[in-house]
Image (spheres, rainbow, N blue to C red):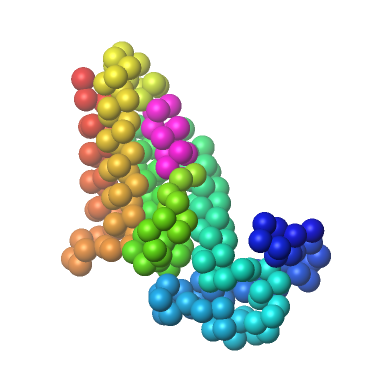
Amino acid sequence: MSRPGGRQEPRQARSREMVDRILLAAAQVLAERGYGGLSTNRVAEVAGVSVGSLYRYFQDKDDLVEHLRERSTADVLEALGAGMAEAVALPTRDAVRHVVATLVAGLQRHRAVISALINEVPLGSHGNVLPDLERQLAHVTRMFVASHAPGLEPAEAEARIYLAMGITLTTSLRIALEPPPGITEERLVDLTAELLEVGLLLP
């Protein structure tokens, strides 16, 4: 079976292992050289496969980056889902903090990929950088407001959700990718959680 663009879909275990090796190599090259230094030749070399083998599964370097984006997003979403399930039993401030800390940790695991998508990949090449993550955060925030501030007018609730979304994702990205010197990650996560709690639950 082929994917769009005529590339093969890995079906056998050996093929899937090769694809995994190629993507791991792509992430390594991206971390070392950035998007500008990413090339299919270099990725094939690091993966220990021929360029021809790489092209059986990937069209070009942008195809590699798109697959990395999909894998990174899936991993962060899985961790975020688990973090949200754990947060249910926590007090409000601790619950918000736990979700933010989980998001930051997930983004840090894929720093090279996400940094390249935000800062280096040509605008529009991959649409919205993290659309699935944004949708998940919007869903969680909406549930939080409905549970903890049920008396808010719908328009007011939507305004707070909109702002909370921007604060959560933008701040988490900055903590994960560009932490300021002299301030601990723990303190930044604490402050973010405090801002979100106050902003979402303000009478």
Above/below status of 70 relative to 142: below
In the image, farthest residue toward the left = 182
In the image, farthest residue toward the front = 5
Total labels: the figure holds: 0
Q: Position of residue 88 (x, y in %)?
A: 46, 32
Residue at (27% x, 27% y) in the render: 159
| Dominant secondary structure of the residues highlighted in magenta in the image | helix
Quarter of the image with the N terminus is: bottom right
| Quadrant housing residue 56 | bottom right
Above/below status of 18 relative to 168: below
Residue at (71% x, 63% y) in the render: 6
User: Can residue 106 be seen in the rendering of this structure?
Assistant: no
Q: Which residue is nearer to you in this view: 10 or 14?
A: 10
Above/below status of 113 relative to 190: below
Magenta region includes residue 173: no
| Quadrant housing residue 7 | bottom right
Q: Position of residue 82 (x, y in %)?
A: 53, 43
Quarter of the image with the C terminus is: top left
Q: Is residue 76 left or right of residue 176?
A: right
| Quadrant housing residue 140 | top left
Q: Which residue is nearer to you in this view: 169 or 45?
A: 45
Residue at (40% x, 28% y) in the render: 142
Q: Position of residue 187 (x, y in %)?
A: 24, 53
Q: Which residue is nearer to you in this view: 182 or 6?
A: 6
Residue at (28% x, 50% y) in the render: 171
Q: Is residue 11 left or right of residue 197?
A: right
Magenta region includes residue 138: yes
Q: Position of residue 89 (x, y in %)?
A: 46, 32
User: Can residue 173 be seen in the rendering of this structure?
Assistant: yes
The residue stretch that appears in magenta: 133-144
